[in-house]
Image: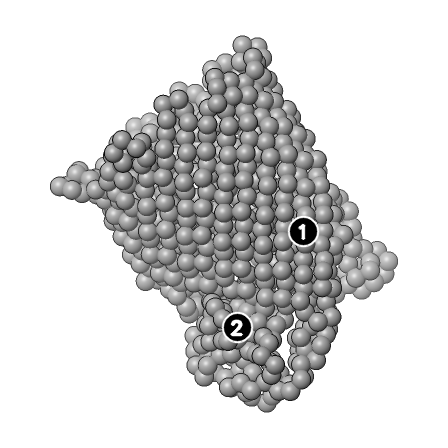
């Protein structure tokens, strides 16, 4: 049936499974499923029911930036994210922020490659797989979509999209959309705000040529939810002192306005396909990006005896709110990044061979100063955006007081060559590929006492081979061996210092090795009249396994990395869905994972006895069940996702319990009423059981309890921190095409 946002109701598993043909594991959440979800949901939540996807959320409605996705035990900074062939990962930390990607109304599908990306994928961290977002195409007829939503926590959302249809005889068509969202924090004080624009214009030719222009603008101020330790969670649960304070008293560093995170970005890309001849085609995806934001935190500074790097700061700070020589400030962590690149490739069909050859070039410029914002008598920072240095704390000579001042330029050059060989009357397909990726980083740290100029260079060869055999038109087997890598994150290049003492907090490391992985997959797929399913067995071997964690840098939670050495991961993924039967479409997925650390971990000049222990963020069991009903007028979905216990320390001495979340959607579509085409009413109920759980690991630790190292050193323990699982939320959405 055609609805307010296109046809729905015909996809298997309610839109959570579709026939796949790649010689590697891939799962897809398609438009049928996406259009029934809450419009505030982000890309991580949209794939949470797929096999291997372990999504930790802090916010039931998907507005907060504090979400995490791990695949087969590999964390989000080891997963590549792309939008129609453009990289989306933060170039410094490799993290992805799914609330920035695109509005759900404009997404056609989200694909999850659990093992490896494609040969031409432009990322330098996809050791753990690839999440790729594809937008809907503009319609050929002029029209649009109008939508409004209201729900729990005073959530308001308005969305409008205009489709131009074919513009005269030009062959160009496009859409432009705008959304505005605001919601109270579900836990503690504060309110999030987000404005977003997507657009896509395409021009198709009859011979298959195609040019598109795609853009995204996002402007948001979201809240950082506190991440408790196990002890805090057991004592206070969702409430208590672990939440930010709603009112400010002098000296309070836990006031919620000190933790507002503003971020603004703009993406632009132009994927192009040109058919040069019957056997030769050219593709290119040029892109450009700009992002600017701030991640502040509450801190206190002494008014005298400060340091900038190792250099003492003369004189005293003259600021309001001084108490006993201390003053509350917002410790800022700015990031301004510019990025541009292009991925051109040629595809040549020669008999039974399809040869692909291409390059990828990427240039990024990333600046990360860390100034301090004075706060007013009511605790409000002078300027959370830090648009000008005049609003920050400045020294007597007019310079900003900075905890750090890092500047990184990263250049990526990659060459790739592949050949797909079709044999046995096209029943057997063999993929051969090789990619060489060269990464050059140059860094400057303009803080006294720090190593001013730093950098790192690396090159990784990435061979791969895959095979797909079509047993008959319903059954298929596939196998692949691929290599992947992840370069160390940019902050590892820089020294950092405590501004209250001048002591070194972390030392620059320019000789860290790239994480490198070899993965093998063997799988079977079924594409039947009623049933679609797959099962995949996988095995990974890692060297220099890099684990994302978080450190407190001057009151700001900042990404960092632990080199965990070798790791072996193996397991099985499976999913199955039925095509609609009497309007019902069930879906099931599951994963078994056994991931172990291969060696002892170097800590404090000794070795922590971690060899043989289960890796962090690696639940042995995950599973999901979903059921969709859609008769064209009435529709609904019900789903449950289960995640088993996860260790949060390398010594396996701290973990979170297993947990599950159930969601329900109920809706009705009405006949066309005048200009309103198929108006729709949809109620989304998130976490209907309101389970009180920790949903994931924010920052793992080496050991939670005191341990004696291999050489006799007493290694004190430190707690991990966690994401608090979201509470119950309801959102009512009314939409109509026109």
**Residue 639 x, y percent position in the rendering:** 41, 42
Is 488 left or right of 150, judged from the image as shown? right
Residue, x 32% and y 48% (percent of image)?
A: 177
Visible in this render: residue 163? yes
Q: Quadrant of residue 655?
A: bottom right
Residue under label 2, please give it. Answer: 389
**Residue 588 x, y percent position in the rendering:** 46, 35
Q: Residues within 10 Å of mark 1 (few under 14, many from 20)?
A: some
Residue under label 1, please give it. Answer: 441
Residue, x 54% and y 34% (percent of image)?
A: 344
Q: Quadrant of residue 309?
A: bottom right
The residue nearer to you, when weighing 289 against 565, is: 289
Task: Decide which of tag 1 and tag 2 comes sooner along the chain.
Answer: 2
Task: Give the alpha-carbon distance from disc 1 to disc 2, as whole Å.
Answer: 27 Å
Residue, x 17% and y 38% (percent of image)?
A: 671
Asked if 394 appears above or below 514 in the picture, the reply is: below
Can you name the residue that lies furthest to the bottom here? Answer: 324
Q: Residues within 10 Å of mark 2 (few under 14, many from 20)?
A: some
**Residue 599 x, y percent position in the rendering:** 77, 47
Q: Considering the numbered disc 1 on the image, is that residue within a helix, a strand or a loop?
A: strand
Q: Considering the numbered disc 2 on the image, is that residue within a helix, a strand or a loop?
A: helix
Quadrant in which the C terminus is drawn: top left
Asked if 640 appears above or below 281 in the picture, the reply is: below
Is 384 left or right of 303, judged from the image as shown? left
């Amino acid at each position: 049936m055609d609805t307010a946002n296109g046809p729905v109701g015909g996809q298997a598993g309610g839109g959570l499974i579709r026939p796949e043909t790649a010689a590697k594991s891939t799962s897809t959440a398609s438009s049928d499923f996406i259009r029934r979800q809450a419009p505030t949901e982000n890309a991580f939540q949209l794939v949470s029911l797929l096999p291997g996807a372990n999504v930790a959320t802090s916010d039931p409605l998907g507005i907060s930036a504090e979400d995490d996705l791990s695949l087969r035990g590999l964390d989000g900074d080891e997963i590549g994210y792309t939008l129609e062939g453009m990289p989306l990962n933060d170039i410094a930390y490799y993290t992805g922020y799914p609330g920035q990607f695109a509005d759900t109304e404009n997404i056609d599908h989200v694909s999850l490659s659990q093992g490896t990306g494609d040969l031409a994928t432009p990322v330098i961290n996809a050791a753990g797989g690839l999440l790729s977002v594809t937008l809907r195409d503009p319609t050929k007829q002029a029209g649009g979509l109008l939508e409004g939503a209201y729900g729990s926590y005073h959530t308001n959302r308005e969305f409008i999209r205009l489709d131009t249809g074919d513009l005269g005889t030009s062959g160009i068509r496009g859409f432009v959309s705008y959304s505005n969202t605001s919601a109270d924090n579900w836990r503690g004080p504060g309110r999030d705000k987000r404005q977003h624009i997507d657009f896509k214009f395409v021009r198709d030719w009859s011979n298959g040529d195609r040019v598109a222009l795609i853009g995204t603008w996002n402007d948001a101020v979201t809240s950082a939810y506190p991440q408790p330790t196990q002890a805090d969670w057991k004592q206070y649960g969702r409430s208590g002192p672990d939440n930010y304070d709603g009112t400010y008293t002098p000296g309070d560093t836990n006031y919620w306005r000190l933790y507002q995170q503003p971020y603004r970005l703009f993406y632009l890309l132009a994927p192009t396909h040109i058919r040069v001849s019957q056997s030769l085609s050219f593709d290119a995806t040029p892109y450009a990006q700009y992002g600017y934001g701030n991640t502040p935190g509450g801190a206190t500074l002494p008014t005298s005896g400060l340091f900038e790097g190792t250099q003492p700061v003369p004189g005293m700070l003259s600021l309001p709110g001084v108490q006993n020589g201390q003053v509350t400030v917002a410790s800022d962590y700015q990031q301004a990044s510019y990025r541009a690149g292009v991925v051109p490739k040629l595809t040549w069909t020669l008999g039974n061979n399809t040869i692909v050859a291409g390059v990828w070039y990427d240039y990024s410029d990333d600046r990360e100063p860390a100034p301090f914002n004075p706060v007013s008598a009511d605790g409000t920072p002078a300027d959370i955006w830090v648009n000008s240095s005049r609003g920050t704390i400045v020294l007597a000579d007019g310079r900003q007081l900075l905890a750090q001042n890092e500047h990184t330029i990263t250049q990526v050059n990659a060459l790739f060559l592949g050949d797909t060989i079709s044999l046995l009357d096209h029943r057997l397909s063999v993929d051969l590929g090789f990619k060489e990726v060269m990464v050059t980083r140059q860094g400057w740290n303009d803080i006294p006492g720090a190593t001013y100029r730093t950098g790192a260079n690396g090159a990784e060869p990435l061979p791969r081979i895959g095979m797909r055999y079509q047993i008959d038109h319903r059954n298929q087997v596939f196998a692949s061996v691929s290599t992947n890598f992840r370069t160390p994150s940019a902050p590892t290049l820089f020294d950092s210092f405590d501004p209250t003492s001048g002591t070194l907090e972390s030392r620059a490391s320019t000789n860290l090795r790239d994480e490198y992985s070899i993965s093998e997959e063997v799988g079977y797929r079924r594409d039947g009249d009623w049933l679609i399913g797959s099962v995949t067995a996988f095995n990974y071997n890692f060297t220099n396994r890099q684990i994302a964690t978080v450190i407190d840098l001057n009151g700001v939670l900042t990404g960092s990395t632990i080199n965990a050495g070798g790791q072996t991961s193996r397991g099985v993924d499976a999913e199955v869905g039925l095509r609609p039967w009497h309007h019902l479409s069930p879906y099931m997925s599951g994963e078994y994972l056994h991931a172990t650390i291969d060696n002892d971990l170097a800590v404090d000049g000794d070795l922590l006895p971690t060899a043989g222990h289960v890796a962090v963020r690696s639940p042995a069991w995950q599973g999901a069940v979903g059921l969709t009903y859609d008769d064209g007028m009435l529709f609904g979905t019900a789903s449950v996702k289960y995640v088993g216990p996860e260790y949060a320390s390398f010594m396996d001495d701290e973990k979170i319990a297993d947990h599950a979340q159930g969601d329900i959607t109920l809706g009705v579509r009405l006949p066309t009423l005048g200009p309103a085409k198929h108006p729709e009413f949809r109620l989304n109920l998130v976490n209907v059981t309101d389970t009180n759980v920790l949903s994931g690991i924010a920052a793992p630790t080496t050991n939670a309890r005191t341990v004696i190292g291999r050489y006799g050193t007493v290694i004190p323990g430190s707690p991990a921190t966690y994401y608090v699982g979201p509470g119950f939320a309801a959102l009512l959405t009314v939409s109509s095409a026109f």
